[in-house]
């Protein structure tokens, strides 16, 4: 299982040339912000991403791929199933 620190490190390196900031929320979920550093424009903001299903590098890589698809589609929020159950 990956630590939240490692999860964030992998996520934050997965969106170049855009920047990615990963914040661990008090409930253990993540808030992921993908943005253009020069202008500060936020391209994607995902609050409450559950880490329970992100147990391997492959899982994180799959999440990055899905988020890149959302970015290409021009969406500013993700409607997928990454929220924590019961939350």
Image: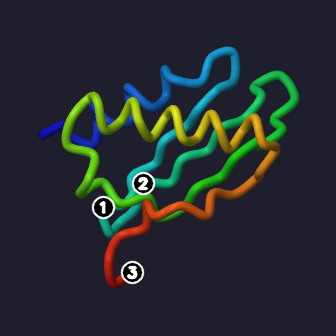
Q: Residues within 10 Å of mark 3 (few under 14, many from 20)?
A: few
| Residue at image location 30% in from the left, 54% down from the top | 51
Q: Is residue 66 left or right of residue 52?
A: right
Res. 30 mark: 2
Residue 19 location, quadrant: top right
Report x, y in % for residue 64. 49, 34
Say if 84 sits above or below 87 in the image. above
Residue at numbered disc 1: 28
Gap in angstroms between the C-alphas marked 3 and 2: 13 Å
Q: Is residue 5 left or right of residue 20?
A: left
Colour scheme used in the picture?
rainbow
Residue 78 location, quadrant: bottom right
Q: Nearer the viewer, mark 1 or mark 3?
A: 3
Report x, y in % for residue 23. 46, 48
Report x, y in % for residue 79. 61, 64
Which quarter shows the C terminus?
Answer: bottom left
Residue at numbered disc 3: 87
Q: Residues within 10 Å of mark 2 (few under 14, many from 20)?
A: many
* Residue at the limit of the structure toward the left, as seen here: 1
Report x, y in % for residue 36. 77, 28
Say which label, 1 or 3, has the lower sequence index.
1
């Amino acid at each position: 299982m990956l630590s939240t620190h490692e999860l964030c490190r992998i996520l934050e390196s997965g969106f170049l040339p855009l920047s990615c900031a990963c914040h661990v929320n008090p409930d253990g979920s993540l808030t992921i912000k993908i943005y253009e550093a020069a202008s500060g424009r936020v391209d994607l903001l995902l609050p409450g991403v559950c880490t329970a299903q992100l147990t391997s590098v492959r899982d994180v890589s799959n999440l990055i791929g899905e988020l890149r698809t959302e970015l290409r589609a021009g969406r500013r929020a993700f409607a997928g199933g990454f929220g924590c159950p019961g939350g």
